Image (spheres, coloured by chain):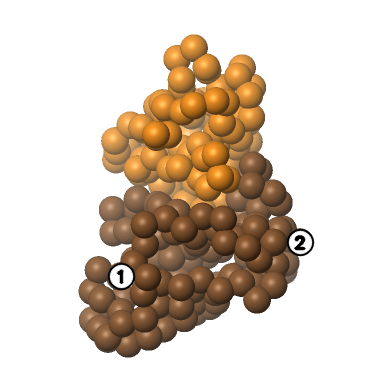
Chain colours: A brown, B orange
Amino acid sequence: DTAVSQTPKYLVTQMGNDKSIKCEQNLGHDTMYWYKQDSKKFLKIMFSYNNKELIINETVPNRFSPKSPDKAHLNLHINSLELGDSAVYFCASSQGTRTEQYFGPGTRLTVT
Amino acid sequence: GNSVTQMEGPVTLSEEAFLTINCTYTATGYPSLFWYVQYPGEGLQLLLKATKADDKGSNKGFEATYRKETTSFHLEKGSVQVSDSAVYFCALGGSQGNLIFGKGTKLSVKP
């Protein structure tokens, strides 16, 4: 049973489109995150939710909007996709905000 | 602000060689420290962690000790295998729970 799952695994789309990435965790954790990994493998936090409330919102364009319908899900919606949005997006979860995080397999987004 | 610096790669070793990947950090307070590993095409897996000074994290033959005096958390393994080939990330726990990562070190182990 996959602990943190993401769909889709690959996403190829054109500039200007709107797309969503879904994340689900079955670990019973109360905190979920979105990270972006660029082409040089650098990882950076984008958003964090604790008990469905936004607690971290890094300097990310407002074209990116996270939504947490419940503690087990954190989705990422991206409007008006740009070439620079191409990256691998990782979802993660943890119990509380000061413990280890468990990562999903990633979604490779390619914008053409 | 908090930050992590780890040695640039790539690192290429022969099987059974000794591995050290250096990691130093800058932080206020006493953050938890982590090593994550990313195998090709996969997500990140927690390799080991340490939550306070002098703690030693260990897993699968890898070890790292939380050194407050040198603000370091170097990763070591006595004898690497081909299957250890991956990208290794040092990270510290930020004040809001986010992980702050180093740039990653790619390790290639040759038979």
B28 vs B82, nearest the viewer: B28
The kind of residue on which mark 2 rests is Gly
Q: Is residue B13 above or below residue A55?
A: above
User: Do the residues at pointers 1 and 2 share their chain?
Assistant: yes
Of the pair B82 and B34, the residue shown nearer to us: B34
> Which corner quadrant of the image does residue B23 belong to?
top left
Residue underneath mark 1: A85
Residue in the image at 47% along x and 58% along y:
A57
Q: Amino acid at mark 1?
A: Asp
Read off the chain for label 2.
Answer: A
> Compared to B65, does A29 lie above or below?
below
Who comes first in sequence, dot 1 or dot 2? 2
In the picture, which quadrant includes the N terminus of chain A? Answer: bottom right
Q: Position of A19 compared to A30: left or right?
A: left
Within 10 Å of the Cα at label 2, are there few (<14), some (14-19), or many (20+) other Cα atoms? few
> Where B5 sits versus A103, above or below?
above
Please report, as a chain letter, where disc 1 is located.
A
- Residue A95 image point, x, y percent: 71, 51
| Closest to the observer, A74 or A110 | A74
Residue A27 in percent (x, y) is at: 73, 61
| Helix, strand or loop for disc 1 | helix
Q: Decide: few, some or many residues near mark 1? Use Cα within 10 Å; few <14, some 14-19, many ≥20.
A: some
On the image, the x and y values in percent for residue B55 come to 64, 22
**Residue occupying image coordinates x 64% and y 30%:** B51
Image quarter for residue A12? bottom left
| Position in image of residue A48 (x %, y %) | 55, 58
Give the residue number, with chain letter if any, for mark 2: A28
Q: Residue at x 66, y 53 (%)?
A: A94
> Can you see residue B61?
no
Q: CA distance from mark 1 to mark 2?
A: 30 Å
Can you see residue A107? yes
Which quadrant of the rendered structure holds the C terminus of chain A? bottom left
